Image (cartoon, grey):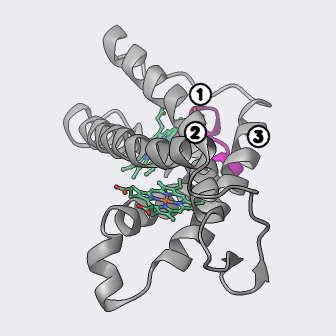
Amino acid sequence: MLATAERYNRVARALHAAIAVLILANLLTGFFHKPLDEVLRTMPFHKASGLTILVLSLARLGWRLTWTAPALPQSTPAWMRLAARAVHLLFYPLMIVMPLSGWIVASASDRPLTWFGLFPVAKFAVTRGDTAYVLGHEMHELLGWVFAALVVLHVVAALYHHFAMRDGLLRRMW
Ligand code: HEM
Ligand code: HEM
């Protein structure tokens, strides 16, 4: 059992888990939305879950600024510390810019924007010809790939710590 000081706090762990599950779902429903549409319309879920990610990420960022993360295990090499820091730092803006750019793209569509059909969500005043739409669309697509690559790297690193280095790092967050 890890000491409390060596683990992320309960709120951080809960937010990390919820956001991780939703982001994995959004990457899948985003990249495969065309083939998925043939079977099931997943885009309304993608949009609502993406907006949830935005709200949870803002809460997480606020919470994160109020405490210091537990120090990495002594055995972690310097290059790995640097890589982990860089990836974690990149995740925060991605967790905010991805949903915001998606929101801009969805705003230009005629389809209604709701939160899981429960209540309507306001749209930005953009149309498909606007620079904001073109930029938002490009960013959403390009950053989707960057995000997916970093998530793969992050998960491989977490599993490497767990199975190869056996330093208990995974248990700090899960
Ligand atoms: C972290 C949250 C999100 C992630 C990781 C994500 C990821 C993706 C990915 C990977 C794609 C496919 C891009 C492509 O190759 O064309 C996509 C498409 C799309 N996303 Fe998201 N998304 C997120 C949030 C949102 C939100 C909040 C909305 C709207 C409110 C949204 C609306 C859309 C739309 C409309 C498309 C289709 C774009 C097109 O016409 O090609 N996304 N998303
Ligand atoms: C899929 C989307 C994910 C995102 C966006 C994400 C993001 C993050 C961020 C930003 C941190 C740093 C926390 C901080 O100090 O503020 C973190 C830590 C961590 N994540 Fe994830 N994560 C994701 C998925 C996962 C998954 C699937 C695993 C496990 C297989 C995982 C394992 C960990 C671990 C073990 C830590 C703690 C690392 C340490 O102690 O320094 N994450 N994650």
Report the number of numbered marks: 3
* 2 or 1: tag closer to the N-terminus: 2
Label 2 close to label 1 by CB (< 8 Å): yes
Local secondary structure at mark 1: loop
**Residue at image mark 3:** 63
Foreground pick, 25 / 3: 25
Res 1 seen here:
no
Residue type at mark 1?
A: Pro
Pinpoint residue 163: horizontal percent, then vertical percent. 22, 42
Vertical order, 1 against 106 (above or below): above
Foreground pick, 63 / 25: 25
**Residue at image mark 1:** 70
**Residue at image mark 2:** 7
Mark 3–mark 1 Cα distance, whole angstroms, equals 14 Å
Instruction: Report the span colored magenta.
Output: 1-14
Ligand 2 within 8 Å of the CB at mark 1: yes
* 3 or 1: tag closer to the N-terminus: 3
Residue type at mark 2?
A: Arg
* 2 or 3: tag closer to the N-terminus: 2
Q: In percent of the image, x 67 and y 75: which residue is there?
A: 113
Res 15 seen here:
yes
Local secondary structure at mark 3: helix
